[in-house]
Amino acid sequence: MYNSKIIGLGKYVPEHVVTNDDLSKMMDTNDAWIQERTGIKERRWIKEGTDDTSAVMGAKASKIAIERSGLSNDDIDFIVFATMTPDYYFPGCGVQIQELLGLKNIGAIDIRNQCSGFIYAISVADQFIKTGMYKNILVVGAEYHSNGLDKTTRGRGVTVIFGDGAGACVLSREEDTSKGILSTHLHSEGKYADKLIVESPSIKHWVPQILEAKEEDLSYFPYMDGTFVFKHAVVRFSEVIMEGLMKNGLNKDDIDMLIPHQANLRIAQFIQKKFALSDDQVFNNIQKYGNTTAASVIIALTEAWEEGKIKSGDNVVLAAFGSGFTWGSAIVKW
Ligand code: UT7
């Protein structure tokens, strides 16, 4: 058995910055409400007329991650792509970036686990590496939310939260099993699927329902019972972080860096307090990017690394919670 180790990280966010004040021109909201409830100051939204999509942004982040890994495209053995906003109903974004990056005819799968998508994705990739089946895997998280949001006052409870962006990493075989990804922990609870959901389009709401959809049909916009999700998030985040630490004989004092999914700064602060972590031990960038679901953990991990906040030997904890419900963690010895 092998471990897998992150050897290259990259991110890409669209240039177009949308501030809270910009949103207040589209809907009845304001900077004070958004910052107080979520910590978000601005987010990036793809500007109409650019070529960016989840697959295209994923490819841009991947290019950087592969370059930084020191590998060449031909060394990549497999692609795992996490998104809840794929370019097409099918095929998935994984196969698109095989083409966009000009990779060999390697396998590619898409992961559909929303905010927990990146944790699920590295867990899947990790298993392929552990068994020896593949040596180098490109793992991507990318989201293009902005085109699917209700940008009126009706949608303000959800729309102000989400942003577009992508992150990627190259996972590679590590012979020393005391290093790299030590363990991953995945969970789901489908009974709460309807608490955070985009119902349409789906095979249940297909043509002719799409063609006949009226403006008041909200099933095409994300729905979230925010308070309900919040309450579950704080419990599940804590549980799954503890589960990961215990599995590795670690305790909360051993955490060098916690990278929580950037759902809401208040959730991250709650976890920080619960685990008695200092500001240096938790990385947040939701202030700049909002919630980019499957891209959020990998964008944050990339930025933390770029800023020199993660060093060799650190215990890095990644954790996420979101629609499904799904949640998960990964314990990484950097
Ligand atoms: O990433 C996946 C997981 N997602 C999460 O973990 C998100 C979890 N939930 C949350 O982060 C929070 O629930 C929200 C930030 C989404 C909402 O915060 P909240 O404190 O739960 O607010 P609320 O939905 O209870 O709304 C409070 C009030 C309402 O007005 P009334 O009924 O009290 O008069 C809303 O209509 O705030 C109003 N409101 C807004 N006001 C200004 C809702 N959205 C907005 C807005 N601007 N954007």
Image (cartoon, rainbow, N blue to C red):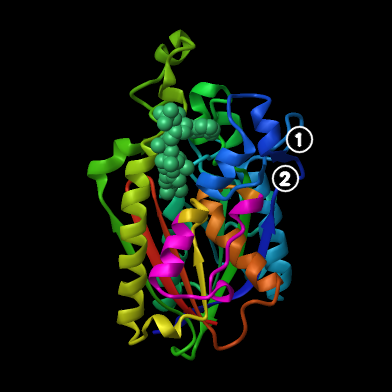
Number of labels in the image equals: 2
Is 140 positioned to the left or the right of 189 in the image? Answer: right
Q: Which x, y percent locates residue 24?
A: 65, 29
Residue 79: x %, y % from top left: 54, 59
- Residue 282, picture quadrant: bottom right
The amino acid pointed to by label 2 is Pro
* 14 to the left or right of 166: right
Q: Is residue 197 left or right of residue 313?
A: left
Residue at position x 33%, y 62% from top?
186
Q: Nearer the viewer, residue 68 or 274?
A: 274
Marker disc for residue 50: 1
Coordinates of residue 159 in the picture (x, y in percent): 54, 34
Based on the picture, tell me whether residue 279 belongs to the magenta stretch: yes
Residue 125: mark: none
Q: Is residue 278 visible?
A: yes
Which residue lies under the disc numbered 2? Answer: 14
- Judged left or right of residue 261, residue 146 is right
Identify the magenta region: 267-288
**x and y percent of residue 169 in the render?**
60, 66
Kindly identify the residue that appears in the image at 60 percent across and 40 percent down.
32
* First-in-chain label (2 vs 1): 2
Q: Is residue 207 above or below residue 119?
A: above
Type of amino acid at the residue the image marks with label 1: Thr
- Is 20 within the magenta? no
